[in-house]
Image (cartoon, rainbow, N blue to C red):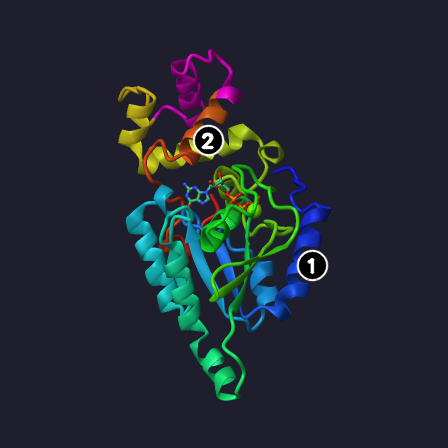
């Protein structure tokens, strides 16, 4: 695979700022995509956080398979990693997130008060890969539209402190990736879920990966969505050939690229039903397809 420059200067800067601000916060809210909760964890964030408590927040749960999300939450619980899953746009997120943060920091806050310090807001830094929903979640936490959001990576370009209730002070940060992915699969998963700019990854590679996955895990939905017959999805039809069939069904003749774009769009929008691309059992297998 060609080397792709997904760690440009602005991301290195964003990561540097995350490190610089770390001493000012009590906790890190690390947002990961519920469809790929492992592959969207940035190893640099864990490193920068050091001993600071980290709350993993699995976002976009509405797009993920609920059963698999449950398995992930069990997995994190087993590994003593505090985690919760939510739709960043839901009404109750402020309550759920505040309660969890207070629970994690209970001892620290109690110690401060025992020393005679005044009760204060919890300071949290919100970090995560681009487009995972950081600014959306923060807007809901502060119940105002103060942070810019948008369905593409790289919307937030600088850090910004936001004040919610008396309970939380929040730092929004630009999305960051890291210089080298563990596996090619991880890069494709990040591209498929929208964390990497579309222009940086070959569309057909991403679409073919998605199509392969759908064939294995979501065949009825795939057939229905693109009006495919049993013969179209027969075992001897290769993934590229199937993509060509889908291209024609979409009325795009041989415009493979346009069909790839549409397929990726449909997947991102959950048009093939809630789909998770990663399960805890994959970690044991250390897959690199
Ligand atoms: N379906 C769904 N969409 C979400 C959720 N959270 C955020 N989004 C959408 O995802 C897109 C990205 O949201 P942002 O909040 O801008 O993401 P961000 O992490 O701040 O992105 P950067 O600033 O680019 O790093 C927006 O279109 C949101 O509406 C969610 O839980 N479910
Ligand atoms: Mg943002």
Left or right placement of residue 113 versus residue 87 in this view: right
* Residue extending furthest toward the right: 9
Give the x, y percent position of residue 68. 32, 50
- Image height check: is 209 above or below 126? above
Q: Is residue 276 left or right of residue 153?
A: left
**In this view, 110 is above or below 91:** below
- Magenta run includes residue 251: yes
Q: Nearer the viewer, residue 171 or 287?
A: 171
Percent x, y of residue 87: 39, 48
Under tag 1, what secondary structure? Answer: helix
**Is residue 156 found left or right of 256 in the rendered image?**
right
Q: Which label sits on residue 275?
A: none
Say which label, 1 or 2, has the lower sequence index: 1
Q: Is residue 241 visible?
A: yes
Q: Which residue sits at x=28%, y=50%?
A: 67
Magenta segment:
236-258
For mark 2, does the 10 Å Cα neighbourhood hold few (<14), some (14 to 19), or many (20 or more) residues?
Answer: many
Give how far across and how far down residue 139 sits, in percent.
49, 50
Relative to 50, say whether 238 is above or below: above
Tell which of 179 and 193 is nearer to you.
193
130 on left or right of 273: right
> Which residue is drawn at the image coordinates 50% and 26% (left, top)?
261
| Between marks 1 and 2 in the image, the one whose residue lies nearer the viewer | 1
**Residue 82 seen in render:** no
Q: Quadrant of residue 102?
A: bottom left
x, y percent for residue 95: 38, 60
| Residue 245 placement: quadrant | top left
Under circle 2, the secondary element is helix
Residue carrying label 1 = 16
Is 183 above or below relative to 243? below
Q: Are marks 1 and 2 in contact (CB under 8 Å)?
A: no
Q: Which mark is residue 264?
A: 2
């Amino acid at each position: 695979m060609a080397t792709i420059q997904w760690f440009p200067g602005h991301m290195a800067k964003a990561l540097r700022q995350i490190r610089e601000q770390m001493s000012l916060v009590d906790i890190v809210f690390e947002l990961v995509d519920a469809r790929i909760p492992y592959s969207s964890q940035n190893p640099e964030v864990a490193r920068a956080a050091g001993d600071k408590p980290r709350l993993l927040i699995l976002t976009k749960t509405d797009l993920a398979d609920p059963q698999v999300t449950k398995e992930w939450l069990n997995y994190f619980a087993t590994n003593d990693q505090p985690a919760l899953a939510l739709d960043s746009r839901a009404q109750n997120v402020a309550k759920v997130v505040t309660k969890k943060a207070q629970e994690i920091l209970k001892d620290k806050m109690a110690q401060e008060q025992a020393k005679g310090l005044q009760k204060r807001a919890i300071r949290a830094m919100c970090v995560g890969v681009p487009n995972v929903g950081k600014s959306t979640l923060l807007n809901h936490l502060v119940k105002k539209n103060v942070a810019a959001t948008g369905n593409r990576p790289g919307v937030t370009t600088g850090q910004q402190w936001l004040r919610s209730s008396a309970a939380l002070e929040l730092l929004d940060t630009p999305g960051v990736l890291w210089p080298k992915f563990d596996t090619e699969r991880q890069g494709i998963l990040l591209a498929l879920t929208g964390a990497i700019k579309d222009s940086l990854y070959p569309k057909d590679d991403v679409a073919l990966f998605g199509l392969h996955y759908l064939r294995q895990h979501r065949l009825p939905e795939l057939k229905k969505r693109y009006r495919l017959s049993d013969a179209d999805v027969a075992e001897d039809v290769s993934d590229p050939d199937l993509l060509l069939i889908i291209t024609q069904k979409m009325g795009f003749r041989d415009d493979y690229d346009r069909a790839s774009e549409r397929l990726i769009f449909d997947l991102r929008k959950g048009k093939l039903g809630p789909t998770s691309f990663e399960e805890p059992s994959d970690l044991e297998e250390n897959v690199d397809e």
